[in-house]
Image (cartoon, grey):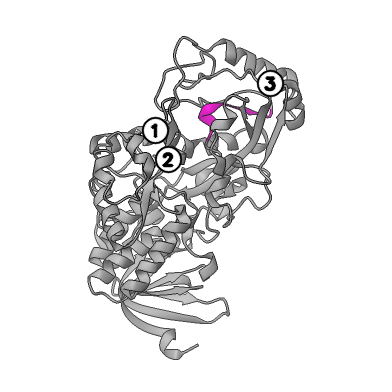
């Protein structure tokens, strides 16, 4: 290795090449700062968790007219209704899903700057669109109604997001270095002045910088830390995204005086394909191993029993907490069950891929036998569910329709009987996305010590920033937070 590269000086070094890290790097580079971004993955394995997302980004807006100038044109816009999503609604959704445990100051900044930050990235070259396939159903008249407050996403999903970020970095002159594992922080006189790193060939080096921005994710790939902080059984969860977020840099920051922030005992976890080979860190299928169609059917465990409210709220306000409910079930396995009437409404990207974990049969008894559930138990569950539905209410998946199944547990919305075969059962387990606990910072990403003072030169953003989420998560908020607080860190670094 070139000795000049082995010990270098730069203005800003960013650790982690996901959405948050690149946002910080772009902001710093636009200010004329020299920036080196270190990514642990090789170039073909880079992008952090952001690569594995669907690209959904939750922002405030005033409706379709308010976003039409920065989203890709689409002929469907002419027959599309996009309800406004206000700052008050955004903040209320965060409070609701976290039971009020979200940091109010971080929330205020995230909400206020969400659209402006997407506009900034769009101006740099990132491409956005309306997410028809995820957030709207076709109505009888051929029109579309978006729901759930989550409407905008990246063209090409997470893969497109990271391709766009990488292209912007090249234009801005950011030095992106792949295959670099950051091994520690260099601290002198209480200030963070650089990092050490290692390469796959065993060589090591250091980079000196005026500022270090940590954007290297949580501890979700570390089974021991999952068990320690999340609890018994979490070592068995499937890792949805990057294999590199092992918590090492969280510990490195704690070792130099940072304090934990947010809820280290909960995480983002979803219903995830249970039996498809290579169902962890799959860069080909990425987010498509998620199974998000559960509001259209029911979920049963291996005993054939329902155990949660599939219609408690819009999918993107419940999906990130239901993975842990699956983990609690026998064998950490459950089955999403649909009939022939509602199977066609399931998203093709998630439910029609080769090798998917699914069984089908003309009768419920035959289906139960195929998935190892006692047939009588499944039939009883479905019959009781069907008989309890208030059929006088019109079923409408675009709104909280109040069409409930009055059973225990209830299904509060979108209750439709499972009556017509063939019937389908999709096997799901718990897929962990990212951990909610991180480092405590101010609203500019400056990492704080126990007495509330910033550690000079040390910033945090992305999933390493603790305080926004607890127990649950509104879909699309992670990418929004990564870019908002990444930009803020980069504006100071």
Residue at image x 30%, y 57%?
A: 122
Magenta residues (range): 293-302
Residue 380 appears left or right of 74: right
Question: From what the image shows, is residue 307 above or below residue 391?
Answer: below
According to the image, label 1 marks what residue?
Answer: 144
According to the image, label 3 marks what residue?
Answer: 378
- Nearest to the eye among marks 2 and 3: give it: 2
Question: From what the image shows, is residue 239 above or below residue 380?
Answer: below
Q: Are marks 1 and 2 in contact (CB under 8 Å)?
A: yes
Q: Earlier in the sequence, mark 2 or mark 3?
A: 2
Q: Nearer the viewer, residue 161 or 315?
A: 161
Residue 317 lies, in percent from the top left, at 41, 35
According to the image, label 2 marks what residue?
Answer: 132
Residue at image x 47%, y 71%?
A: 183
Quarter in which the C terminus is drawn? bottom left
Residue 329 lies, in percent from the top left, at 62, 32
Res. 417 image quadrant: top right
Question: From what the image shows, is residue 392 above or below residue 186?
Answer: above
* Residue at disc 3, secondary structure: helix
* Residue at disc 2, secondary structure: helix
Residue 481 appears left or right of 414: left
Residue 492 appears left or right of 253: left
Res. 314 image quadrant: top left
Magenta run includes residue 191: no
Say if residue 119 shows up in the picture: yes
Say if residue 15 shows up in the picture: no
């Amino acid at each position: 290795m070139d000795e000049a590269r082995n010990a270098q000086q730069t203005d800003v070094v960013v650790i982690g090449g996901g959405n948050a890290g690149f946002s910080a790097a772009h902001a710093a580079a636009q200010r004329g700062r020299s920036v080196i971004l270190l990514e642990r993955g090789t170039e073909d394995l880079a992008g952090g968790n952001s690569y594995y997302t669907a690209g959904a980004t939750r922002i405030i807006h005033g409706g379709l007219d308010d976003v039409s100038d920065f989203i890709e044109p689409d002929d469907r816009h002419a027959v599309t209704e996009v309800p406004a999503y206000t700052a008050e609604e955004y903040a209320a959704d965060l409070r609701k899903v976290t039971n009020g445990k979200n940091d109010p100051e971080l929330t205020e900044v995230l909400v206020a700057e969400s659209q402006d930050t997407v506009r900034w990235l769009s101006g740099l070259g990132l491409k956005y669109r309306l997410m028809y396939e995820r957030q709207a159903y076709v109505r009888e008249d051929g029109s579309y109604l978006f729901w759930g407050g989550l409407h905008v996403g990246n063209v090409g999903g997470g893969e497109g997001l990271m391709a766009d970020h990488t292209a912007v970095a090249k234009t801005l002159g950011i030095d992106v270095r792949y295959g670099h594992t950051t091994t520690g922080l260099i601290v002198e006189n209480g200030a963070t002045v650089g990092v050490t790193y290692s390469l796959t060939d065993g060589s090591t080096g250091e980079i000196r910088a005026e500022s270090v921005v940590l954007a290297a994710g949580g501890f979700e790939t570390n089974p021991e830390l999952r068990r320690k902080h999340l609890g018994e059984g979490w070592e068995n969860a499937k890792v949805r995204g990057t294999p590199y977020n092992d918590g090492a840099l969280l510990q490195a920051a704690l070792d130099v005086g940072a304090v934990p922030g947010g809820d280290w005992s909960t995480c983002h976890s979803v219903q995830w394909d249970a039996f498809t080979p290579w169902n962890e860190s799959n860069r080909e299928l990425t987010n498509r191993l998620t199974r998000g169609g559960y509001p259209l059917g029911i979920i049963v465990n291996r005993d054939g029993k329902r155990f949660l409210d599939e219609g408690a709220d819009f999918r993107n306000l419940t999906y990130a907490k239901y993975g842990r409910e699956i983990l609690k079930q026998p064998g950490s396995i459950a089955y999403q069950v649909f009939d022939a009437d509602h199977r066609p409404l399931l998203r093709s990207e998630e439910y029609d891929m080769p090798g998917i974990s699914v069984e089908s049969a003309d009768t419920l008894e035959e289906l139960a036998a195929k998935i190892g559930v006692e047939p009588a138990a499944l039939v009883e569950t479905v019959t009781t569910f069907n008989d309890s539905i208030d059929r006088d209410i019109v079923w409408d998946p675009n709104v909280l329709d109040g069409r409930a199944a009055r059973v225990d547990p209830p299904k509060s919305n979108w209750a439709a009987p499972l009556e017509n075969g063939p019937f389908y059962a999709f096997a799901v387990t718990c897929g962990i996305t990212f951990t909610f606990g991180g480092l405590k910072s101010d609203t500019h990403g400056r990492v704080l010590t126990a007495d509330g003072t910033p550690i000079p030169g040390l910033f945090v953003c992305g999933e390493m920033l603790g305080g926004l989420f607890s127990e649950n998560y509104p879909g699309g908020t992670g990418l929004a937070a990564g870019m908002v607080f990444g930009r803020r860190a980069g504006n100071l670094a």
